[in-house]
Image (tube, grey):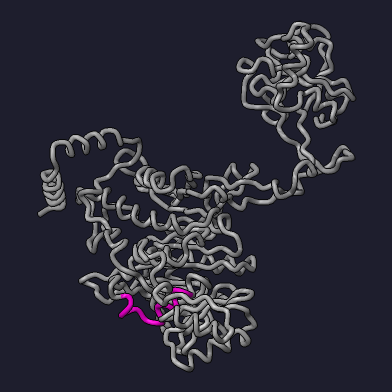
């Protein structure tokens, strides 16, 4: 039976059991709940129902981890398994702790580029788009709970599916759309039948309210003091705005340098950005009260006020460069001959025969050059002088107009370079269509701070992990990575393990150093724990969950790290604060009880937090011996945050 007919039959059977009043109420609710947004056939899709069905627990695979000499704990994680389950685990251990998420999900091209419910989704699948949306919806809703209050998620997507994904992101992250970045993936594209070539992709950016890109500090060299202003260095800022004299006739007026008497015409295509007191008084026709009211309503200084405060810079000029026109006829002749005042760079005429008030310029000294507004370096704190990130991701050697403006221009190699990057590390083309290291590194350089946790739950070949290592090495940061990848094993390739053999192996070789390139120290992130996932039924947790499961869950949740090797001592320290120590005590024999009593002095702390069986008995026993302790049931180390059940 097809998915469509099975879904319809189930729906009809459900409706057949409802009474007439219930059907009317259901119909009324359906009609009144319609909203603007994205819809897909969820009811006809066997979507993931396992959210609350079982408990996901981590298992450390020491042989597949990378533990260099001197490494006692792992701050970085590589998690093998379906990323839906990986995210369920992380929701129980890292809720509200991940500041940056970058993912490169399957693009839903129809070329069997992704698996849903253990089957490849092809181009002819009638439910392809809905299955893709449901697949991402389930994972994005889990990922949303991991972000910090100032966290951000960046998602790569092709142009074909950008609109669908953006609507889905609006559904999952309402009101958090920051924008999108455009990345040119190749220099020449495939010329399609309508002579339209696809050469770009997108990176969607959705962020919580506290997030901001790092930006770039203002170049101090652009602040100078050519006129020896006692207020210090300043930078010239535009004095005009993009309106013509027809659009904004009240801000089309001449201005004069009071120190020289020279006049400057207004550009008819870009009028002044500030109002004029003289124009306002003229419009008020002598009514001084009305003029004062209008001036008080201005949101910024008038042009006259700026000139009086010496915040307008009039460029010096030679006397022979100043134009004079004794008569209007002389002025008109010069304008017709193209010899009137012009913009210095564009040579666009500032005066034309069709412009109003040409009589004003007869007999006036007209200076060349253009005045500008002074912005002093001391006018605002240096922390506020940050250039924003441009939405255009340029090529490594691409000339871009954005280089000429005050914005941070990210640069990335073209898409094809990434395949060679993976090959250089692993010796083969082990992963199709990876993203360039320069792309992800550029994004993370702007999105992360030195102590952030970075998650990629479509980790693929592990490029995000390598980008984190390089950034840490450059700025001394302590960023951590969490990479989630599946094995991609199939019936034809049952032993395939993409996570172990590509993602983890790449990070291992990069950390060790390869092809003459230096490696990375544990302090720079050159280590990782390799985790696999065990799924237990709720009823089986008490019987089948191990002490190692509990130790890892506590370490991930409270220490944001896992020990390089698990031990089997009666008491296992998990995390330490200023005056407390958290320990796991899976058995309550005499040796464990003695060890608990010795811990306060051994670790110089005042209080124990203990996870153990029979918590009430242990709490009373410790209290009798003067040991301050909070004792929790062992099960609480395993199940909090798992499917909303306790």
Q: 509 left or right of 49?
A: right
The C terminus, quarter of image:
bottom left
Q: 636 left or right of 475?
A: left
Q: 271 left or right of 94?
A: right
Relative height, residue 571 to residue 40 (above, below): below
Residue 452 seen by the camera: yes
Residue at the location (61% across, 46% down)?
Answer: 388
Relative height, residue 97 to residue 191 (above, below): below
For this rendering, which residue is in front, 4 or 324? 4
State the extent of the magenta-drawn residues as a range: 541-554
Residue at the location (45% across, 67% down)?
Answer: 93
**Residue at the bottom extreme of this rendering:** 591
Tell me if residue 551 is in the magenta stretch.
yes
Q: Quadrant of residue 428?
A: bottom left
The N terminus, quarter of image:
bottom left
Residue 565 location, x and y as percent?
A: 47, 84
Tell me if residue 189 is in the magenta stretch.
no
Residue at the location (28% across, 64% down)?
Answer: 53
Relative height, residue 89 to residue 543 (above, below): above
Residue 159 seen by the camera: no
Relative height, residue 42 to residue 346 (above, below): below
For this rendering, which residue is in front, 322 or 552? 552
Residue 215 location, x and y as percent?
A: 62, 50
**Predominant SS of the magenta segment:** helix
Residue 185 location, x and y as percent?
A: 44, 52
How many numbered marks are there?
Answer: 0
Residue 352 location, x and y as percent?
A: 68, 14
For this rendering, which residue is in front, 593 or 562? 593
Q: Quadrant of residue 51?
A: bottom left
């Amino acid at each position: 039976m097809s998915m469509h007919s099975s879904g319809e039959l189930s729906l009809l059977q459900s409706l057949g059991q409802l009474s007439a009043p219930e059907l009317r109420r259901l119909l009324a609710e359906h009609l009144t709940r319609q909203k603007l947004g994205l819809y897909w056939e969820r009811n006809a899709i066997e979507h993931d129902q396992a959210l609350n069905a079982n408990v996901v627990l981590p298992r450390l695979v020491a042989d597949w981890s990378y533990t260099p000499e001197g490494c006692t704990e792992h701050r970085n994680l590589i998690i093998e398994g379906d990323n839906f389950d990986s995210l369920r685990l992380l929701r129980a251990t890292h809720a509200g702790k991940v500041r940056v998420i970058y993912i490169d999900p399957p693009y839903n091209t129809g070329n069997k580029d992704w698996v849903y419910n253990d089957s490849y989704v092809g181009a002819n699948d009638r439910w392809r788009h809905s299955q893709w949306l449901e697949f991402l919806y389930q994972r994005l809703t889990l990922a949303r709970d991991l972000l910090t209050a100032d966290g951000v998620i960046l998602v790569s997507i092709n142009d074909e599916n950008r609109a669908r994904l953006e609507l889905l992101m609006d559904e999952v992250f309402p009101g958090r759309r920051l924008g999108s970045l455009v990345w040119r993936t190749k220099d020449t594209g495939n010329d399609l039948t309508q002579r339209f070539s696809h050469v770009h992709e997108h990176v969607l950016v959705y962020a919580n309210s506290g997030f901001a890109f790092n930006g770039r500090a203002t170049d101090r060299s652009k602040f100078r003091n050519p006129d020896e202003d006692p207020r210090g260095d300043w930078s010239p800022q535009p004095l005009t705005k993009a309106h013509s004299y027809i659009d904004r006739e009240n801000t089309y007026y001449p201005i004069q340098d009071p120190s020289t008497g020279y006049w400057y015409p207004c550009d008819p295509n870009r009028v002044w950005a500030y109002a004029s007191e003289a124009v306002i008084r003229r419009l008020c026709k002598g009514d001084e009260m009305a003029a004062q009211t209008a001036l008080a309503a201005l949101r910024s200084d008038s042009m006259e006020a700026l000139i009086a405060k010496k915040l307008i810079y009039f460029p010096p000029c030679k006397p022979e460069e100043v134009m004079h026109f004794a008569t209007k006829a002389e002025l008109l002749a010069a304008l017709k001959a193209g010899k009137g005042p012009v913009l210095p760079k564009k040579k666009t005429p500032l005066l034309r025969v069709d412009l109003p008030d040409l009589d004003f310029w007869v007999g006036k000294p007209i200076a060349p050059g253009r005045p500008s507004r002074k912005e002093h370096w001391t006018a605002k704190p240096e922390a506020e002088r940050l250039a924003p990130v441009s939405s255009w991701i340029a090529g490594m050697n691409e000339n871009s107009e954005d280089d000429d403006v005050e914005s941070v221009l990210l640069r990335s190699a073209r898409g094809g370079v990434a395949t060679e990057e993976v090959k250089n590390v692993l010796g083969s083309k082990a992963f199709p269509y990876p993203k360039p290291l320069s792309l992800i590194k550029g994004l993370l350089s702007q999105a992360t701070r030195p102590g952030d946790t970075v998650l990629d739950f479509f980790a693929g070949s592990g490029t995000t992990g390598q980008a984190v290592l390089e950034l840490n090495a450059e700025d001394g940061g302590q960023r951590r990575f969490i990479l989630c990848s599946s094995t991609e094993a199939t019936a034809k390739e049952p032993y395939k393990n993409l996570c172990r053999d590509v993602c983890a192996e790449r990070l291992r070789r990069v950390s060790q150093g390869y092809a003459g390139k230096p490696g990375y120290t544990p302090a720079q992130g050159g280590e990782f724990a390799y985790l696999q996932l065990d799924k237990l039924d709720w009823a089986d947790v008490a019987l089948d969950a191990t002490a190692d499961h509990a130790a890892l869950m506590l370490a991930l949740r409270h220490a944001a790290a896992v020990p390089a090797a698990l031990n089997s001592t009666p008491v296992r320290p998990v995390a330490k604060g200023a005056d407390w120590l958290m320990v796991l005590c899976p058995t309550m024999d005499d040796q464990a009880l003695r060890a608990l009593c010795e811990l306060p002095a051994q670790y110089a702390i005042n209080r124990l937090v203990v996870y153990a069986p029979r918590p009430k008995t242990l709490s009373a026993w410790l209290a009798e011996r003067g040991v301050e302790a909070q004792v929790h049931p062992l099960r609480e180390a395993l199940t909090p945050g798992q499917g909303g059940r306790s």
